[in-house]
């Protein structure tokens, strides 16, 4: 198959590209290389003979249509998005234009391309719109999100993703484009930008800086190793049923404070010479994020039962692999910093937006 992966130089997107290229598929990465996209994240896939890179923005209709015409994909995996809740509080319009306008632009171009295919290619074509469990809002102490959960977004980020979901669904119903939607729980793993909780914690502990934890740290997340997520997206893109939504989670719930303490434990073990052991002493509780969702949890029964997917990496193993990767790949995250990315503190209300290229 030939895949067009938007946002393919980002955290999740680059993992998808690396997986597909390693499997021998033809892959075209489409990425605007904002602060969140880095060619280096593609690793050996970047220069592989079955991979091509296009630097372009999903909001650019001409560039998107040209990519379809010239690459002739069999499937689209749409990951291009602004994705950080804190940044969405500071700069909500960036999320509206990229996540909503960009998705609609891509859907329009995909529909034009799809109508021009022959009958067999039209039947086989798939468009996977990748979204987040945050569109469902917040859970209490019990219960899980399912594909039937109502949409109740609580941040500008999740509202923009909810809107893009609705456009994707509408394109399926109105134009018959073979669209599928996926929602994932919190991803973690190698190549994640140091603006998210896990890499923020690792690098702060490594450098002896305060480790910020919002509120009381009791917010609960279902943690999904990024390689398991990439596997699920590949399954859906290959075998999913058009018109279906698939929720992807690892059934690995942990509070934020317990996650931070677990990372500090790994740092104590892996960096025994550190002057800041025990690293948990660096934890600092800070003012909570406005509208901070209390708990997310996903029932991944559909993707498990219909497509045979299951997570392969448990949270303990995945977290250890992640901490080791950041310790062994300083060149990558130092280059991110060198490109003007600010990782010294979480981004939120009252803080200036990070510099963008």
Image (cartoon, rainbow, N blue to C red):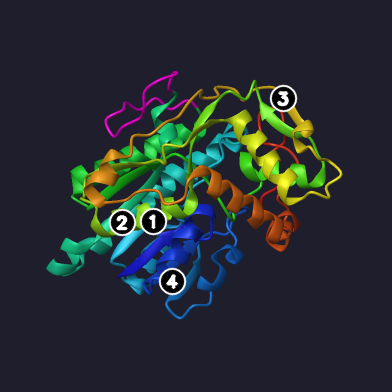
- The residue tagged 3 is 285
Q: Is residue 354 visible?
A: no
Asked which secondary structure carries label 3, the reply is strand
The overriding secondary structure of the stretch rendered in magenta is loop
**Secondary structure type for disc 2:** helix
Quadrant that contains the N terminus = bottom left
- Work out whether residue 48 can be spotted: yes
Position of residue 51 in the picture relative to residue 263 (left or right): left
Mark 3 is surrounded, within 10 Å at the Cα level, by few (under 14), some (14 to 19) or many (20 or more) other residues, namely some
Specify which label sits upstream in the sequence, 1 or 3. Answer: 1
- Distance from Cα at disc 3 to Cα at disc 4: 42 Å
As rendered, which of 284 and 89 lies closer to the eye?
284
Rendered residue at 42%/77% (across/down):
50
Tally of marks? 4
Q: Is residue 207 magenta?
A: no
- Residue beneath disc 4: 22
Mark 2 sits on what residue?
A: 235
Choose top left, top right, bottom left or bottom right for residue 316.
top right
Whole-angstrom CA distance, mark 2 to mark 1, is: 6 Å
Pick the residue in front: 22 or 134: 22
The answer to whether the residues at label 2 and label 1 have Cβ atoms under 8 Å apart is yes
| Residue 17 sits above or below residue 268 on the image | below
- Counting residues from the start of the chain, the first of labels 3 and 4 encountered is 4
Q: Which residue is mark 1?
A: 231
- In the image, residue 120 sits, relative to residue 275, either above or below, namely below
For the magenta stretch, what is the residue range? 139-154
Instruction: Identify the element where label 1 is drawn.
Output: helix
Q: Quadrant of residue 264?
A: top right
Contact, mark 1 vs mark 3 (Cβ under 8 Å): no
């Amino acid at each position: 198959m030939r895949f067009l992966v938007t946002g393919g130089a980002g955290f999740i997107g680059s993992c998808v590209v690396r997986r597909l290229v390693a499997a021998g598929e033809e892959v075209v990465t489409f990425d605007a290389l904002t602060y969140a996209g880095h060619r280096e994240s593609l690793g050996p896939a970047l220069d592989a003979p079955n991979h091509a890179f296009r630097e372009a923005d999903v909001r650019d209709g001409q560039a998107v249509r040209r990519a379809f015409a010239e690459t002739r994909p069999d499937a689209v995996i749409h990951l291009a998005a602004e994705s950080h809740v804190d940044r969405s509080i500071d700069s909500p319009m960036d999320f509206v234009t990229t996540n909503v306008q960009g998705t609609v632009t891509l859907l329009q171009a995909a529909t034009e391309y799809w109508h021009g295919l022959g009958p067999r290619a039209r039947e086989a074509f798939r468009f996977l719109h990748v979204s987040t469990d945050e569109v469902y809002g917040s859970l209490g102490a019990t219960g899980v999100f399912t594909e039937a959960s109502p949409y109740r977004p609580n941040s500008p980020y999740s509202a923009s993703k909810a809107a893009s979901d609705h456009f994707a669904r509408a394109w399926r119903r109105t134009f018959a484009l073979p669209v599928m939607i996926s929602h994932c729980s919190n991803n973690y793993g190698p190549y994640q930008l140091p603006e998210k909780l896990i890499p923020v914690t690792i690098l702060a502990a490594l450098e002896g800086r305060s480790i910020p934890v919002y509120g009381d740290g009791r917010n609960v997340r279902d943690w999904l190793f990024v390689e398991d997520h990439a596997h699920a997206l590949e399954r859906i893109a290959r075998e999913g049923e058009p018109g279906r939504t698939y929720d992807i989670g690892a059934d690995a719930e942990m509070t934020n404070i317990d996650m931070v303490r677990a990372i500090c434990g790994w740092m104590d073990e892996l960096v025994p010479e550190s002057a800041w052991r025990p690293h948990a002493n660096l934890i600092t509780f800070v003012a909570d994020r406005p509208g901070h969702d209390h708990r997310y949890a996903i029932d991944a029964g559909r993707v498990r039962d219909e497509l045979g997917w299951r997570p392969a990496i448990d949270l303990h193993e995945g977290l250890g692999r992640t901490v080791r990767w950041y310790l062994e790949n300083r060149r990558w995250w130092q280059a991110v910093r060198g490109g003007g990315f600010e990782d010294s503190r979480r981004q939120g209300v009252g803080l200036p937006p990070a510099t963008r290229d």
